[in-house]
Image: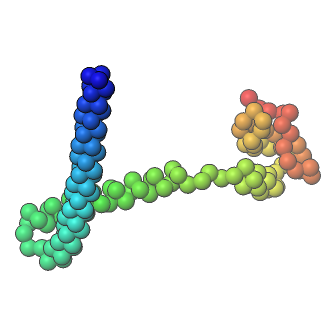
Amino acid sequence: MSLLDNVNDVWTKARVEAKKKYDTTRLDMRIRAYAKEETELYAKAGKLLYAELRANVANANLLSMFESIDAIKGRIRDLDRQKAELNKPQATVAEEEAANAAFHSLNKKDGDFVLARTSEGIRLVRVKSASGGGTDDGEVDN
C-alpha cells in the first residue's frame, strides 16, 4: 500500500503545483493586459497634451522638444514612403513588353543601334531596316 500512497502523494503534489502555475500565469496575463491598456491610455493622453501644448507653447524647452518630435515624425514619414516604394509591385512582363514595343515603333534608320531586351539580357542591337522595323538580334555590337 505504501507504493500506492507514494504515487497518490506525488500525483497530488504535481496537481497542486500545476494548478498554482496555471493560476499564476493567468494572473500574469491579466496584469500584462492591464499594463498594456495603461500604456495605451498614457500614450493617448500624451498625444492630446502634445497637440494642445503645441498650439499654445510659451516654454522654449518645450518648443525645442516639439520641434524634435516634428522632425522625427518627418523622418518616419519619409521612411514609410521609402518602404511603400520598395513594396510597390514591380511592372509585369506584359507592361515591359508593351513599353519595349512602343520604344521600337519609333522611326529608326537602317544600321542604328538601340538597347533591347534579349534572351541574354539587355544588349545593344542594330536595327534591321527602316521598312521592317524591329531589331536584328544577330547583329550585336560589342
Q: Position of residue 106 (x, y in %)?
A: 79, 56
Give left or right: position of 128 versus 79.
right
Residue at 21% x, 72% y is 48
Quadrant where the N terminus sits is: top left
- State the residue in front, 107 or 76: 76
Give left or right: position of 131 versus 4.
right
Q: To which quarter of the image does residue 121 belong?
A: top right
Q: To which quarter of the image does residue 81 belong?
A: bottom left
- State the residue in front, 115 or 71: 71
Q: Is residue 29 positioned above or below 59 on the image?
A: above
Q: Is residue 111 visible?
A: no
Q: Is residue 141 positioned above or below 28 on the image?
A: above
Quadrant where the C terminus sits is: top right
Q: Is residue 132 visible?
A: yes
Residue at 84% x, 43% y is 135
Q: Position of residue 29 (x, y in %)?
A: 27, 51
Residue at 15% x, 61% y is 65
Q: To which quarter of the image does residue 31 belong?
A: bottom left
Q: Position of residue 100 (x, y in %)?
A: 75, 51
Q: Is residue 135 positioned above or below 81 on the image?
A: above
